[in-house]
Amino acid sequence: MSKRNNMKYGLRWQILKRDNFTCQYCGQYAPNVQLEVDHKIEVSNGGADNPDNLVTSCWACNRGKEHLRIYQGKGKIPIHRADRQNEIMGIITQENGITTKELIERISIQRSNADVALYRLKEKRQITRKGRKWYPCAS
C-alpha cells in the first residue's frame, strides 16, 4: 500500500477560493459549515491532486457521499445535492410526513445520503421530526 501524500496548503486554498468557499454538493458556505477539499476520483482509485479532480465539500457531504459517485465533465451529469433536497422536501410536503425508511424506498437513495439531505433540511428549519416521521415545518 502506497503512502498518501498530504495535499499542499496552497492548493487547498486555491480550490476553496475557486469555489467561493461554498460546498459544491449542497451549497452551504463558510463560516456556517466546516469545509474540506474533496477528490472527485479518490486517490485510492487513481485520482490525483490536481485542480480538475478537486472540489470544495462540507464535512457532512464529504462523509455522506461515500457510496455516491459524483463526476463532472465528459458526458457524465453531476448530481446536485440541492436538487435532491428539493425532491425530498416535495415528498415530505406531499405525504405530510414520511419515515426515513419510506423515503429511501420511494426514491432509491443510500441511507447515508438520505441522512445528510434530511440533516440539511432540518438545519435549514424546513422539516422537523416527530417520532419516526419527518414533517414540513409550519411557515
Image (cartoon, rainbow, N blue to C red):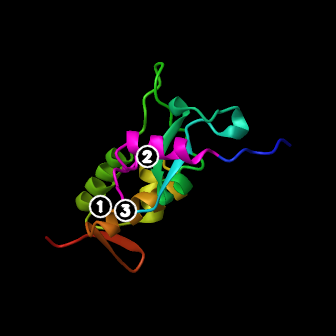
Eyeballing the image, is 61 above or below 45? below
Q: CA distance from mark 3 to mark 2?
A: 21 Å
Q: Position of residue 43 (x, y in %)?
A: 68, 39
> Magenta span has 33?
no
Which element carries disc 3, helix, strand or loop?
A: helix
> Magenta span has 12?
yes
Q: Residue type at mark 2?
A: Leu
Residue ranking furthest to the top: 74
**Callout 2–callout 1 Cβ contact below 8 Å:** no
Q: In the image shown, does 58 or 103 lie closer to the viewer? A: 58
Residue 16, numbered circle: 2
**Callout 3–callout 2 Cβ contact below 8 Å:** no
Which element carries disc 2, helix, strand or loop?
A: helix
Q: Position of residue 83 (x, y in %)?
A: 32, 45
Residue range in magenta is 7-30
**For the point 72% across and 39% down, which residue is it?**
44
Residue 120, numbered circle: 3
Q: Residue type at mark 1?
A: Ile
Q: Quadrant of the N terminus?
A: top right
Q: Residues within 10 Å of mark 1 (few under 14, many from 20)?
A: some
Residue 92, numbered circle: 1
Which of the marked residues, 2 or 1, is nearer the chain's N terminus?
2
Q: Quadrant of the C terminus?
A: bottom left
Residue ranking furthest to the right: 1
Which element carries disc 1, helix, strand or loop?
A: helix
